[in-house]
Image: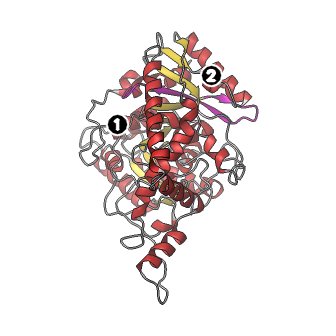
Amino acid sequence: MAASPVQTARRMAVDIATGAQSAAEICRAFLERIHVEEPRIGAFNLVADERALARARAIDAERGRGPGLPLLGVPIAVKDNMCTAGVPTTASSRILRGFVPPYSATVVERLESAGAIVIGKTNMDEFAMGSSTENSAHGTTRNPRDLTRTPGGSSGGSAAAVAAGMVPVSLGSDTGGSIRQPAAFCGLVGVKPTYGRVSRYGLLAFASSLDQIGPLAHTAEDAALVLQVIAGHDPRDATSSSETVPDYLAAIDRGVAGLRIGVPRAFVGNGVDRDVQQAFDDALARWEGAGARIVDVALPHAGHAIPVYYLVATAEASSNLARYDGVRYGHRAVSRQGDGLQQMYDRTRDEGFGAEVKRRIMLGTYVLSAGYYDAYYLKAQQVRTLLRQDYEQAFDQCDVVAMPTTPTPAFKLGEKTDDPIQMYLSDVFTVGANLTGLPAISAPAGLSADSLPIGIQLTGRMFDEATLLAAARSLEVD
């Protein structure tokens, strides 16, 4: 029985466990779908056909010999910044050309332990630095809803793969909106968990105090299913939380009756596309009709989030990316007569990194340098504290904070590549959750006049992903 691209991951796992479907047949069906769709979309950096099919056949052979697994036989795509043992992992950068990690990220281990089949590694903005998946050594990814437009970034490949039916679910990483913005542009549910909820072990670091891994899916139920599997303490990640992980699937249908939804109207009132504003208002009205209460809240420092983010994130990137020197792994520049070690470093990094990564490394190095640290980096960290306090005060009046996920629907490819500031501003509503460490979700909220998806974002209290998933689910069943 062939798999349908719109079949949910949860239903698929149940069918495989009961014998209603074969893991191998499902895997082949999705590989055929990838073969058809990939040439026009460019979602994958690598498709692990033989590895995936071998695992699917093993699952079929072992079926019925043990307890059911929550993702049994479900094909899943993983962003190409998560180490996968024996599979090339490049972060879409020339500097990691030829790198094959000897170990897997914790999230990959947990997916496979839950029965999932990693079918491939998805394209992304190089080292997760971008909002359009145009900053990639592997080429551009296109939005399945409109091939002239971006799927978002940096997890654009992961979002496009799900939206095009090439996989039922995928993993992305989110440093400033890189799960939620692609989810909004591609009409998906995307979750950025609380900082520390999901292990970062094996994730190629961009900005260590901001990075989190999370799911992209067609439904809140599938997002909850994947988050359930990957969440939880990991002793290999010093920032991993030991906070108890609730049963997300049990909580997902509890609805929004009595939920207080805060809206920072002063912040979301400017620069938002008319269709996005209408979809946002309509989603609030639907929640209100389902029993939620809409309240006004203030986030007085939210307007500073973008400059704060691009100081903190670039400073951490400058430090994290110093390890790529051409000595231990990845690309190394060809030696020239008379080259010393410093020349090899310089040429390796110049050849290996793309323009956006170089821009961020230079900015981060500058803000950390003597004479500028206090004026820029330290000041940014102080404002980051104020942003966190804004949310704490808002949660005295509400349970979640609602905003549009993005100011506009998906923009055209090439539209913002020559204007970094405009590209950065596309994350104006998403960076706050990363700076504060709070969980946030993007859920589909409608379509624009051009039939482009629009997302609505909810930010919740620390470790309260369950409420966000329940609210997203309520939009699907309303």
x then y, percent, for residue 60 = 34, 49
x then y, percent, for residue 149 = 69, 47
Instruction: Tell me, for residue 240, which label it has, or none.
Output: none
Q: Secondary structure at mark 1?
A: loop
Q: Amino acid at mark 2?
A: Ala
Rendered residue at 53%/52% (across/down)? 129
- Magenta-drawn stretch contains 460: yes
Given residues 304 and 198, the one toward you in this image is: 304
Q: Residues within 10 Å of mark 1 (few under 14, many from 20)?
A: many
Q: Amino acid at mark 1?
A: Arg
Q: Is residue 373 left or right of residue 446?
A: left
Q: How many numbered marks, from 0 up?
A: 2
Q: Residue furthest bottom?
A: 337
x then y, percent, for residue 111 = 35, 45
Range of the magenta residues?
445-464
State which mark lies toward you, 1 or 2.
2
Instruction: Tell me, for residue 197, which label it has, or none.
Output: 1
Q: Residues within 10 Å of mark 2 (few under 14, many from 20)?
A: some
Rendered residue at 38%/73% (across/down)? 327
- Closer to the N terminus: mark 1 or mark 2? 1
Q: Is residue 438 above or below residue 83?
A: above
Rendered residue at 59%/47% (across/down)? 131
Given residues 74 and 307, the one toward you in this image is: 307
Q: Is residue 468 above or below residue 147?
A: above
Asked if residue 78 can be seen in this view, the reply is no
Residue occupied by mark 2: 266
x then y, percent, for residue 91 = 48, 58
Rendered residue at 30%/42% (across/down)? 239
- Give the spatial CA distance, label 1 vs label 2: 31 Å
